[in-house]
Image: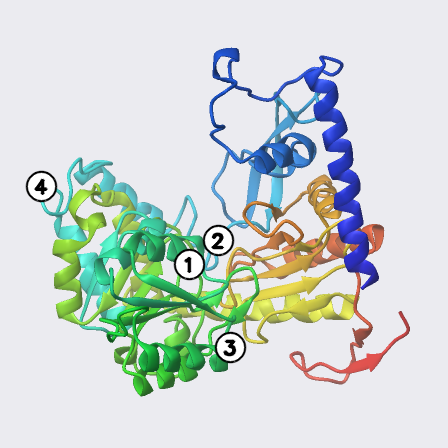
Amino acid sequence: MLVAVLTYVGYGVLTLFGYLRDFMRQWKIEKCQNATEREEQKDFVPLYQDFENFYNRNLYMRIRDSWNRPICSVPGAKVDMMERVSHDYNWTFTYTGRVIKDIINMGSYNYLGFAQKTGACQEAAAKVLSQYGAGVCSTRQEMGNLDKHEELEKLVARFLGVESAMAYGMGFATNSMNIPALVGKGCLILSDELNHASLVLGARLSGATIRIFKHNNMQSLEKLLKDAIVHGQPRTRRPWKKILILVEGIYSMEGSIVRLPEVIALKKKYKSYLYLDEAHSIGALGPSGRGVVEYFGLNPEDVDVMMGTFTKSFGAAGGYIGGKKELIDYLRTYSHSAAYATSMSPPVVEQIITSVKCIMGEDGTTVGRARVQQLAENTRYFRRRLKEMGFIIYGNEDSLLLSLLSRIKYGTFYNSSCSCSATTGIIVMISLSLGSAFGREMLKRNIGVVVVGFPATPIIESRARFCLSAAHTKEMLDTALKEINEVGDLLQLKYSRRRLVPLLDRPFDETTYEETED
């Protein structure tokens, strides 16, 4: 309760000072550097909400250096970053010309380490680039359907264990443009409250009725399903044309894995459809990287629409939808992404083909399987060490995304691994002010960390992300852990009263707890 009160008091103080500064800017006492309407437009309705402008001017601007940091290398285990400075409190930045070398990258979605400038993926992509060029300049329905696209879709279908699949050039649009093709007016969408923005946008664009159930709460979902069947559509009481359940495999900001067996059981019981977004789990979860369906040992046919992206584990771009052949044939005709979007770039397609074959072992090696196992080992090691340091860890125990609760002050700050349970990372809960300080202190120590804040998250739930990768060596992880431990002490982020006590005679992956005084 004390932490919550201090959080809101802190925002109250910041808000009061923000209004004071706005008053000073209005009367020319302080220089106004933000974009404003022209005098002749003063009576127009503003394009942006007043509070969002207020937040940007008076809160976000002071910590803006924590975002949009430009890198100038491959986003591998280590990156090079262009140094920049600001002399006006982050209103503008000046590049010094210096490059900060060998920053340990804890912020990219490069889960399996396929984002690299050498190796089989790079060589295959370069060869295809010389043969096909960089762009297609047409849609799949016109002159943009290459043999490489056909090969990719057949490969993805085999990888997922479904009848057919279709690839798209953008992961976000895979959700936002295909959901409207599947449901519309007279249909009902039941969406998890923590679903990604692409799912939310797709649901809104569809015109279907949307109802939200509590995160991973099967009682809440079943209640909505019962009510939908008993009461039907509002006013008319007619049965819903379709009921579509939207869930993610791993929720990136919480580190939780969907309770898929129970969701499938409810879907079958109430004759509804299931749409599963595996953006973060595909390639990273399950013994052979086939995602949350394999993790639970389920039949892929029980999921009506299997969606995922190539932007994380495969080191590329785009997304896919897999399912029955009738579904995919329908989407090839009615999906806006298929009809109007330019086809995927051939080198990107080849990057995906090569990485998927590597994961499946069709390249004649065990490198892909070894990367999946290495990712899991890195995550277990990182989680165990953080618990030993006294951090509170959130998320599913088998999730590659670890949530670490840190001390909250003037807000809440999450450190999330750009992924979900099946993505690799830890989520650290800290405050808005501590979040920017955390990111700056880590960068000083050559550790690249992503900080996520409003409006991407609720205003009091800012998050800092650590994304683990199979490309991270134990030495890199130990270096990062050492610096996290130091910064955690500096900013008082160790909030756990249950310290993990390392025992010399225990197996590597076992844990023992003892109560310690706070």
Q: Are marks 1 and 2 in contact (CB under 8 Å)?
A: yes
Residue type highlighted by circle 4? Met
Disc 2 from disc 3: Cα separation: 27 Å
The residue closer to the viewer here, 80 or 333, is 333
Q: Are marks 1 and 3 in contact (CB under 8 Å)?
A: no
Apparent side of residue 288 relative to residue 208 in the rendered image (left or right): right
Residue at label 2?
A: 109
- The colour scheme used to paint the residues is rainbow
Disc 1 from disc 2: Cα separation: 7 Å
Few, some or many C-alpha atoms within 10 Å of disc 1 (few <14, some 14-19, many ≥20)?
Answer: many
Disc 2 from disc 4: Cα separation: 32 Å
Mark 3 vs mark 4, foreground winner is: 3
Few, some or many C-alpha atoms within 10 Å of disc 3 (few <14, some 14-19, many ≥20)?
Answer: some
Residue at label 4?
A: 143
Choose the circle earlier in sequence order: 1 or 4: 4
Residue at label 3?
A: 217
Residue at horizontal 32 percent and vertical 63 percent from the top: 307
Q: Are marks 1 and 4 in contact (CB under 8 Å)?
A: no
Residue at horizontal 77 percent and vertical 70 percent from the top: 388
Few, some or many C-alpha atoms within 10 Å of disc 2 (few <14, some 14-19, many ≥20)?
Answer: many
Residue 141 visible within the image: yes
The residue closer to the viewer here, 3 or 209, is 209
Apparent side of residue 422 relative to residue 101 in the rendered image (left or right): left
Choose the circle earlier in sequence order: 3 or 4: 4
Choose the circle earlier in sequence order: 1 or 2: 2
60 versus 167 height, above or below:
above
Choose the circle earlier in sequence order: 1 or 3: 3
Disc 1 from disc 4: Cα separation: 29 Å
Residue at label 1?
A: 313
Element type where label 1 sits in the image: loop
Residue type highlighted by circle 1? Ser
Residue 52's disc number: none
